[in-house]
Image (cartoon, grey):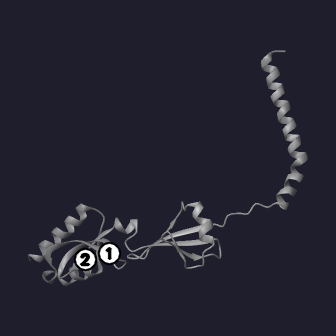
């Protein structure tokens, strides 16, 4: 019999023996697992709360070594900047940041500031930061445009922002 065939038959026989052993011993292994249950780690819900825009973003990748220390703390306690906000369904952690969330940092709008048209980052009415002021006074604009600016005019690109400002400048000069 060729050597290759012998190895193939030996491997097949070995797999059959393993399968039979699994069938025979599976009930005993399951019983042993019931006698010595493995404790599941409590799920960790980590949320970053952004104070300026009031958005909340779920996070992952919490250091597992910190979980043991956090689970021993009372609700409301702080550890490494995280606040333990609940234990009812696993650990609920919250990290508070005073600024804007990543999504709002990418959003921009035109509004009013100090009597002039201004450029903001963020979302109108949800928290924003002043980026720069223009030289366009709001008192010289028509009422409809002024109302739009007070609500906030969101733009998606630099080109769109320049077009809006150009239009406001043209209205100012009328």
Residue at image position (26%, 79%) is 148
Q: Mark 1 points at which residue?
A: 128
Using the numbered discs, state the Cα–Cα distance from disc 2 to disc 1 in whole angstroms. Answer: 10 Å
In front: mark 2 or mark 1? 1
Mark 2 and mark 1 lie on one chain; the one further toward the N terminus is 2
Which residue is at the front of the view, 174 or 62? 62
Residue under the point 89% across and 41% down: 20
Pick out the residue farthest to the top.
1
Q: In which quarter of the image is the C terminus?
A: bottom left
Number of marks = 2
Classify 10 Å Cα crowding around label 2: few (below 14), some (14-19), many (20 and above): many
Asked if residue 140 is positioned above or below residue 38 in the image, the reply reads below
Q: What element carries label 2?
A: strand
Across and down, in percent, residue 17 comes to 87, 36
- Figure quadrant of residue 8: top right
Residue 139, position as x, y percentages in the image = 14, 84
Pinpoint residue 62: horizontal percent, then vertical percent: 55, 62
Decide which of 112, 145 is in the foreground and name it. 112
Q: Which residue lies furthest to the right in this view?
A: 24
> Are the two marked residues, 2 and 1, in contact with CB atoms closer than 8 angstroms?
yes
Quarter of the image where the N terminus is located: top right
Q: Which residue is drawn at 60% across and 66% down?
A: 67
What crowding class fits label 1: few (fewer than 14 Cα within 10 Å), some (14-19), or many (20 or more)?
Answer: many
In the rendered view, tell whether residue 112 sits above or below residue 1. Answer: below
Q: Dot 1: what SS?
A: strand
Q: Position of residue 16 (x, y in %)?
A: 86, 36
- Label 2 sits on residue: 111
Q: Is residue 137 left or right of residue 32?
A: left
Give residue 19's quadrant in the image: top right
């Amino acid at each position: 019999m060729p050597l290759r065939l012998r190895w193939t038959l030996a491997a097949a026989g070995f797999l059959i023996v393993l399968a039979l052993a699994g069938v025979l011993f599976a009930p005993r292994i399951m019983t042993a697992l019931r006698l010595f249950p493995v404790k599941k780690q409590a799920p960790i819900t980590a949320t970053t709360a952004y104070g300026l825009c009031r958005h909340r973003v779920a996070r992952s990748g919490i250091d597992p070594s910190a979980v043991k220390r956090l689970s021993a703390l009372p609700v409301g306690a702080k550890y490494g900047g995280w606040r333990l906000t609940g234990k009812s369904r696993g650990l609920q952690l919250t990290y508070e940041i005073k600024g804007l969330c990543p999504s709002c940092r990418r959003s921009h709008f035109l509004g009013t500031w100090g009597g002039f048209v201004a450029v903001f980052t963020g979302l109108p009415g949800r928290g924003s930061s002043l980026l720069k002021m223009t030289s366009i006074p709001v008192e010289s604009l028509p009422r409809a445009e002024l109302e739009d600016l007070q609500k906030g005019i969101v733009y998606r690109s630099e080109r769109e922002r320049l077009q809006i400002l150009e239009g406001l400048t043209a209205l100012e000069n009328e």
